[in-house]
Amino acid sequence: MVEYFTEALVLDKEDSGDLDARIILYTEDLGKITAKAKSVKRITSKLNGHLEPLNFIQVRLVEKNGFQIVDALTIANSANFKENPAVFFRLLNFIKFFKEMTFDLQPDRKLWLAMKEIVANWLIYQKKEKAIYRLIIKILGFDPAHAACVFCRGKEINFFSPEDYIFFCAKCAIKIPKKEIVLI
Ligand SMILES: [Zn+2]
């Protein structure tokens, strides 16, 4: 049994059985992982409140047939964004995009620091949302500066597909369902 203690951003929380949850974390030391959190749906659970999406936490994990969360403590929570639903919704979309773009167990220091900065200061960064998406795409190795539209090879790209890692110009993006692409 291996134990880890790392900082993490909670990306998502899914039900797993009656009392447990599956938590998707982007951790500083391990990259993205899915970890089981036992009995968090009990009223007496001390863990549950810390494992809300968009929280930054200190987490203790054990690895034995997958990861399990033993302990978690909130460093910064997302409560201040929830007051403004439009801002909060945009952040959730950004986090969903980030989750789609990253692979399990691929830690990336640059990406971790960028996410810490962006999420903590989302009220400022959401005003330059396109630049933020471009930055994340670039850190992950798909530099929009050297990209071309997958259909017409045009250099002026405005959209990106996180599923297929391809770029589109505004004109060609009309052919793609909006929920499958992000504006960059
Ligand atoms: Zn095009």
Image: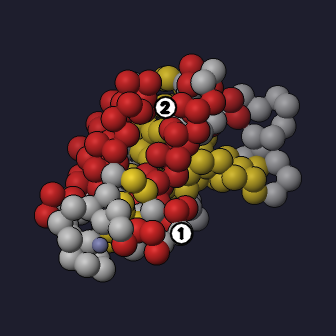
In the figure, 181 relative to 115: above or below? below
Residue at position x 39%, y 53% in the image: 183
- Left or right of 130? Residue 16 is right
Amino acid identity at mark 1: Pro
Q: Nearer the viewer, mark 1 or mark 2?
A: 1
Check the image and tell me how it is coloured.
secondary structure
Q: Quadrant of ligand 1?
A: bottom left
Q: Residue 59: image x %, image y %?
A: 51, 36
In the figure, 151 relative to 52: above or below? below
Q: Is disc 2 placed on a helix, strand or loop?
A: strand
Residue located beneath label 2 in the image:
56
First in residue order: circle 1 vs circle 2? 2
Question: How many numbered marks does the figure carry?
Answer: 2
Crowding near pointer 1: few (<14 within 10 Å), some, many (20+)?
few
Crowding near pointer 2: few (<14 within 10 Å), some, many (20+)?
many
**Quadrant assignment, res 166:** bottom left
Instruction: State whether residue 59 appears in this view.
Output: no
- Left or right of 59? Residue 41 is right
Residue at position x 33%, y 52% in the image: 184
* View extreme (front): residue: 171
Q: Is disc 1 placed on a helix, strand or loop?
A: loop
Q: Residue 84: image x %, image y %?
A: 60, 24
Residue at position x 43%, y 52% in the image: 98
- Left or right of 96? Residue 155 is left
Instruction: State whether residue 158 appears in this view.
Output: yes
Front residue of this view, candidates 24 and 68: 24
Residue at position x 47%, y 46% in the image: 94
Residue located beneath label 1 in the image:
177
Amino acid identity at mark 2: Phe
Cβ of mark 2 under 8 Å from ligand 1: the answer is no
* View extreme (bottom): residue: 151
